[in-house]
Image: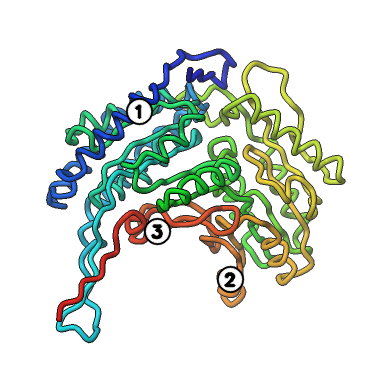
């Protein structure tokens, strides 16, 4: 049984009976049966359907926003923004897929040689709870526009959101079987990956689960894209605009109550401005509040999605403080109803401490001191993760150097690390492999076929 809990109240939400193994197999076969027709549908017609999906998402935005607030605690304003971002993603691929997938002529000893991009078949998306609409569209929009059919396995925390998202696709008029929702319990996922009609896998989630998915997909020689989170560094040099940097760092860390893979998690500050940055961040953190995510006009942070995640986060904070870090604000486990956690600012964090070495998934920021630019880069790269990174400086040469030397899938200079449908997103190391979004993401689940004509 899928048994979601409202993280604001701690009370159970209506349970959902997962599909039986036989029913799940039947639905995958329906998606596979729909593939030839969808593959042969002109890309211009597929684009019309994706634009209809965008319109349907906007039409159902309040339903989707309410369900996200209830099932995983996303604040109302952020939920509305997530649905809009998902709609924009659908429109982006509707507008640009033909360009991205156009055949490319390459010179050879043939009279004509070229590369074309053809869909693989049915693609399985295994999706997390923290952005259940946006991350679904990040997978679905490019895969569908490439001509694949999709089956979506959402996280057990958000079954109602997944069902409503599936209903929005159905209302948009996609052909039967082209996109199907599979409400499944986690132990069923392995058999779904093994299904012979599943040709590729997209996974977003934890590193532990990602290893299992990668191994299972590899056993079937199925391509996979893995987005597995990170411990993203943010370097602040002495010549930076400190006010703007601290504003953006606070925003980055507090989006979705800190439950974001690409949030700034480790701030590494040049010694000359270390105390100033700590003071500015303290002012911002102590002004933050938590509250009911269903309050449409509230600026408060929502709760952590689950009790075990709340307790795990608090354990990381406790171990970091015990190892010698100072906690300027927060750090206490609330005794109130729900799974809230206070905005927590940890300073004097050094390598080996939990908040430096582990991914913290919540409103907790670790601040470390660096003697200079080179040590800041060394500390930033002292991680097994490699998703996003950022640097704040007015020195263009050092910004360019950092952009090249930071070991991450994406780097922001004087701005926030974010996902954008126009740009590829993904990581290295424990942050996974493959790319989503942009022109690169749509080519992850296609057959890059060489054609040689004598």
Locate residue 238 relative to residue 181 in the image: left or right. right
Query: Mark 1 or 2 closer to N-term?
Result: 1
Looking at the image, which residue is at 53% across and 57% down?
A: 427
Residue 334 in view in this figure: yes
Query: Mark 2 or 3 closer to N-term?
Result: 2
Question: SS of the residue at dot 3?
Answer: loop
Q: Quadrant of residue 329?
A: top right
Task: Find disc 3 in the rendering and name its residue.
Answer: 423
Q: Nearer the viewer, residue 133 or 191?
A: 191
Q: CA distance from mark 1 to mark 2?
A: 50 Å
Task: Find disc 2 in the rendering and name its residue.
Answer: 399
Q: CA distance from mark 1 to mark 3?
A: 34 Å
Task: Find disc 1 in the rendering and name its residue.
Answer: 24
Where is residue 210 shown, x and y percent of the image?
54, 45
Of marks 1 and 2, the one in the foreground: 1
* Color encoding of the figure: rainbow
């Amino acid at each position: 049984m899928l048994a979601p809990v409202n993280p604001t109240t701690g009370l159970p939400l209506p349970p959902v009976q997962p599909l039986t193994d036989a029913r799940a197999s039947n639905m995958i076969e329906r998606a596979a049966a729909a593939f030839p027709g969808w593959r042969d549908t002109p890309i211009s017609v597929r684009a019309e359907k994706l634009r209809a999906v965008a319109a349907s998402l906007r039409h159902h935005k309040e339903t989707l926003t309410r369900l996200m607030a209830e099932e995983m605690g996303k604040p109302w304003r952020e939920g509305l923004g997530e649905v809009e971002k998902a709609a924009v993603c659908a429109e982006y691929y509707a507008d640009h897929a033909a360009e991205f997938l156009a055949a490319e002529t390459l010179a050879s000893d043939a009279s004509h040689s070229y590369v074309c991009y053809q869909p693989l078949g049915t693609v399985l998306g295994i999706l997390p709870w923290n952005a259940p609409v946006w991350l679904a569209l990040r997978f679905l929009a490019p895969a569908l526009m490439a001509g694949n059919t999709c089956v979506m396995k959402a996280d057990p925390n958000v079954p109602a959101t997944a069902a409503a998202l599936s209903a929005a696709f159905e209302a948009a008029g996609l052909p039967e079987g082209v996109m199907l929702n599979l409400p499944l319990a986690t132990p069923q996922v392995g058999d779904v990956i093994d299904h012979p009609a599943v040709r590729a896998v997209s996974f977003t989630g934890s590193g532990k689960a990602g290893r299992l998915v990668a191994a299972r997909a590899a056993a079937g020689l199925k391509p996979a894209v893995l987005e597995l989170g990170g411990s993203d560094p943010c370097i602040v040099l002495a010549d930076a605009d400190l006010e703007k940097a601290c504003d953006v760092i606070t925003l980055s860390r507090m989006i979705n109550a800190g439950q974001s893979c690409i949030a700034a998690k480790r701030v590494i500050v040049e010694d000359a401005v270390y105390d100033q940055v700590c003071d500015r961040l303290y002012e911002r953190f102590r002004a933050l509040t938590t509250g009911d995510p269903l309050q449409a006009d509230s600026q408060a942070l929502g709760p952590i999605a689950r009790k075990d995640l709340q307790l795990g986060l608090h354990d990381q904070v406790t171990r970091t403080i015990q190892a010698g870090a100072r906690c300027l604000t927060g750090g206490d486990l609330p005794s109130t109803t729900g799974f809230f956690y206070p905005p927590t600012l940890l300073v004097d964090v050094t390598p080996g401490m939990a908040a430096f070495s582990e991914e913290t998934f919540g409103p907790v920021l670790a601040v470390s001191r660096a003697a200079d630019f080179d040590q800041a880069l060394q500390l930033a790269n002292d991680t097994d993760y490699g998703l996003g990174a950022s640097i704040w400086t007015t020195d263009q040469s050092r910004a360019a150097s950092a952009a090249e030397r930071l070991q991450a899938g994406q780097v922001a200079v004087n701005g926030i690390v974010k996902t954008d449908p126009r740009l590829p997103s993904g990581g290295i190391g424990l942050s996974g492999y493959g790319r989503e979004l942009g022109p690169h993401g749509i080519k992850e689940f296609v057959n890059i076929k060489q054609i040689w004509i004598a």
